Image (cartoon, helix red, strand yellow):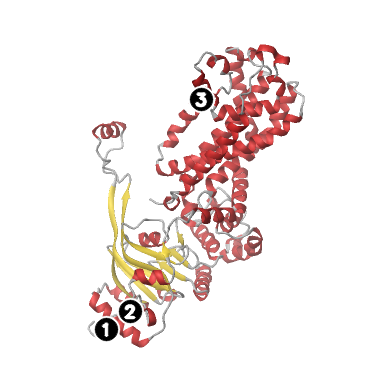
Amino acid sequence: MADAAIDTMKETTAVDNQARVPTVVADDVHIIYKVHGAGAGKGSATSALSRMITRKKSPAIREVHAVRGISFTAYKGEAVGLIGSNGSGKSTMLAAIAGLLPTAKGAIYTNGQPSLLGVNAALMNDLTGERNVVLGCLAMGMSPAQVRERYQSIVDFSGINEKGDFISLPMRTYSSGMGARLRFSIAAAKTHDVLLIDEALATGDQGFQQRSKARINELRKEAGTVFLVSHDNNAIRETCERTIWIEHGELIMDGHTDEVVRRYEKGERP
Amino acid sequence: MSTLSDPVNLSAPRGADAGLTPKQLADKYGLSVSGKRPSLPKYVRQLWARRAFISAFATARLVAQYTTAKLGQLWQVLTPLLNCAVFYLVFGVIMQSRDSVPVYVAWLCVGVFVFQFSQSAIQAGTRSISDNLGLIRALHFPRAALPIAFTVIQLQQLLISMVVLVAIVLLNHVTPTMTWLLIVPALLLQSLFNTGLAMVMARIGAKTSDISQLMPFLLRTWMYVSGVMYSVSGYIKNWPEIWQTVYSWNPATVYMDLMRYAFMPDSFDPAVYGSKALVLPHHIWIMAGTWAVVAFVIGFVFFWKSEEEYGRG
């Protein structure tokens, strides 16, 4: 595998001799996380007490070796798709790039602070959509003047108000698609060096998906790098020119989207 | 498919960078380890840049707090008032504390409101990280903004109930004097102290969720030993001097005494109330200031030390 990598590296240097600016460098990353309440033990008070007395470790804590030695480098202006079956470690990898999970071995280097967008990343559910937009933008470091200036374009982008005045309702009343759209719109209002999207676009409707694809392309032109995790292979094909295929926490293939997705769909490992 | 060539290695550095290891490449372009905690001065700068977020977040949360209750914002005043009523009944009437303290009702209410400020700031701080994981995972900002914002909420709440407190004090025939101006520095110092404590509890609460079950008991103990609803001075009079000094450093007592003095300086005057008059410890401002600075600095550094770990798990 290593020899092949060196061979192909020589090939590429011959083809294109331009040095590129890296934004995310994953260097032999291993991620092991502990799962609390894995359900093995009884949750009763007597069992908790006996555990304390016998000083045994809780059986409800299990270790999961989710990512096993993944290395890659992403460069400025790239949109990288991550594919693989459920539980293959894609989302774990994104969380680690965002700095939300520690690496057990190896390291991830990033340019600036990556932003992670996931489907279940709730903002402030008891507050109105309007408040969420303002607070989200302020939290990302915008000034109140900038927020006022961009507020309308964020709401328009999300399309929340297309069917009436929903922006003034608490976010807990939103459907999952509406919530995801508003979160993406807030995060996309800022230029990110590295934007990580975890299935967040899947719940949006057709019109919103078109707008978000256009926005991802803009972000890339602004010299950002976008990572996209999706089970929708067409979305990956349309958005990303490079794709990484992960299975069982190991990198199976890293190459041009057309070839990687074609092989993935056929279940044909290189 | 044997006709396929090996995939091109898109990860490999090209041109002048060819052959660099990932680590060398990261160093060359100044990439930093993801999720690394910023240095303390940088963290302070980031936090300062988020001051608009802190105040907007606090206001939004304060308004949203009682949206499901029919009486709405009225509860902000009703809750401490009902507390005062309960304490007055039990400690004032039944246990007859009201006879040993001048202007007992005003004395009690000031104490309850001031203690409530610290108590709720600590409780809100404990939950500030664990209750906002969604926000923490979705957006990147210095996490200390949360415990600070929750302390600001409690301060805003106290300022609202201050109106009622002033009314109670005036109804008890206390005339406003120049010492009322001391309310402002006393509140500022207590806010600083509360913020520090909230940050300490935020870090502990983020790691061990069991602590939020334990907090009510700790806080109740603290309330009973601090003399919120009865005067402790009578009980500790016969203690050894060293223990009396230790006791007088209790921050809750310090901030309550300051506020009681600011509102009703006459109660501390033996010329007016004789042996019943309250005693203000010496150097009370130094105590209040020390507690504020020490708690805030320790709390801030303690919270920052774990910055990269909030939202994990």
Q: Is residue B90 visible?
A: no
Query: Looking at the rendering, in which quadrant would you find the N terminus of chain B?
Result: bottom left
Q: How would you rate the neighbour count of disc 2 (Cα within 10 Å): few for under 14, some for 14-19, many for 20 or more?
A: some
Total marks in image: 3
Residues at marks 2 and 3 on the same chain? no
Q: Secondary structure at mark 2?
A: helix
Q: Which label sits on residue B4?
A: 1
Percent x, y of residue A117 = 46, 61
Residue at (49% x, 64% y) in the render: A204
Q: Which label sits on residue A259?
A: 2
Q: How would you rate the neighbour count of disc 1 (Cα within 10 Å): few for under 14, some for 14-19, many for 20 or more?
A: few
Query: Which residue is disc 3 drawn over?
Result: B246
Q: Is residue B185 visible?
A: yes
Residue at (41% x, 40% y) in the render: B209
Residue type marked 3: Val
Q: Secondary structure at mark 3?
A: helix
Q: Which label sits on residue B102?
A: none
